């Protein structure tokens, strides 16, 4: 039996239980996947108690992506580089950490090396996106409120020229804009943010965001937070179950399921 959960705070809105349970059903597996309210202050106690139990793994959301992997003995190279992990896997009692966010961005982002790309925000999701773009672009603009996050972004993408911009910067000249800040954080800038390229909005709740509504009104292509959520979940499902499956077929099934439920 597969036993897994998503950990974070707040967690009640998470769509991960729907996604994973549906995938287990499609794969013909007996499995349970729950949502557990855990924050930075009580994660260590929770993990110390539960790590020896028969968990297959944990999905991590805010605010745990930057702290939980410190409790693991094995850490993937890109989780270390981005200082962010959204997945913990139990391999016969040995816990490892990785970032399927990074893998999802690698799959979803199709860019020309000379493309103009901007990332809004500098947290764990932004670092995963920057890391996935590291060897695929010449330079990257990042819109930040806190410039202290620049060094972490440079570590995540050491081969990229990273240029820091203000949050109210003009977005009309970019081929791709990746919005990674929390719900509502960018709303005050939307009125002046005209996007002419593709928008990737990493938020899935609430949906659509003000930025998405504006982009769609302009006829822009939008990659949704649900698409990102499902893409990173595909890798987690593979890791938790140990099964190989048809990613495109499962992706279509899960996105259709979310759209109808």
Image (tube, grey):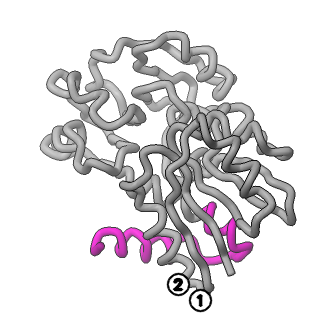
Pointer 2 with pointer 1, Cβ within 8 A: yes
Report, in whole angstroms, how far the alpha carbon at label 2 lies from the one at label 1: 5 Å
Is 176 magenta? The answer is no
Q: Is residue 73 above or below residue 260?
A: above
Describe residue 253's horizontal placement relative to residue 78 as left or right: left
Q: Few, some or many C-alpha atoms within 10 Å of disc 2 (few <14, some 14-19, many ≥20)?
A: few
Image quadrant containing the C terminus: bottom left
Q: Is residue 42 above or below residue 248?
A: above
Q: Which residues are magenta?
A: 235-261
Residue at (30% x, 16% y) in the render: 169
Residue at (54% x, 40% y) in the render: 39
Specify the label residue 25 is tagged with.
Answer: 2
Residue 16 appears in view = yes
Describe residue 42's horizontal placement relative to residue 251 as left or right: right
Measured as percent of width and height from the top left, residue 87 is found at 65, 52
Which of the two residues, 132 or 98, is positioned nearer the viewer here? Answer: 98
Q: Which residue is mark 1?
A: 28
Residue at (46% x, 13% y) in the render: 146
Image quadrant containing the N terminus: bottom right
Which of the two residues, 227 or 2, is positioned nearer the viewer here? Answer: 2
């Amino acid at each position: 039996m597969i036993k897994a959960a998503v950990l974070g705070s707040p967690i009640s809105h998470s769509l991960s239980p729907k996604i994973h349970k549906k995938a287990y059903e499609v794969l013909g597996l007996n499995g349970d996947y729950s949502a557990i309210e855990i924050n930075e202050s009580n994660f260590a106690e929770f993990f110390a108690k539960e790590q020896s139990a028969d968990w297959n793994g944990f999905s991590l959301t805010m605010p745990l992506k930057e702290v939980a992997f410190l409790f693991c003995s094995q850490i993937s190279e890109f989780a270390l580089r981005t200082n962010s992990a959204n997945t913990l896997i139990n391999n016969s009692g040995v816990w490892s950490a990785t970032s399927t966010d990074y893998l999802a961005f690698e799959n979803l982002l199709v860019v020309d090396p000379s493309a103009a790309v901007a990332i809004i925000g500098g947290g764990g999701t932004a670092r995963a996106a920057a890391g996935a773009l590291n060897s695929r672009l010449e330079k990257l603009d990042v819109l930040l409120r806190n410039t202290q996050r620049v060094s972490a972004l440079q570590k995540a993408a050491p081969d990229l020229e990273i240029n820091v911009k203000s949050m109210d910067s003009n977005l009309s000249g970019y081929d791709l804009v990746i919005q990674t800040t929390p719900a509502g954080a960018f709303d005050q800038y939307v009125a002046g943010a005209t996007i002419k390229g593709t928008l990737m909005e990493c938020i899935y709740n609430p949906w659509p965001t003000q930025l998405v509504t504006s982009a769609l009104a302009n006829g822009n292509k939008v990659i949704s937070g649900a698409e990102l959520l499902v893409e990173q979940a595909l890798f987690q499902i593979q890791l938790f179950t140990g099964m190989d499956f048809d990613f495109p077929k499962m992706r279509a099934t899960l996105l259709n399921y979310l759209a109808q439920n």
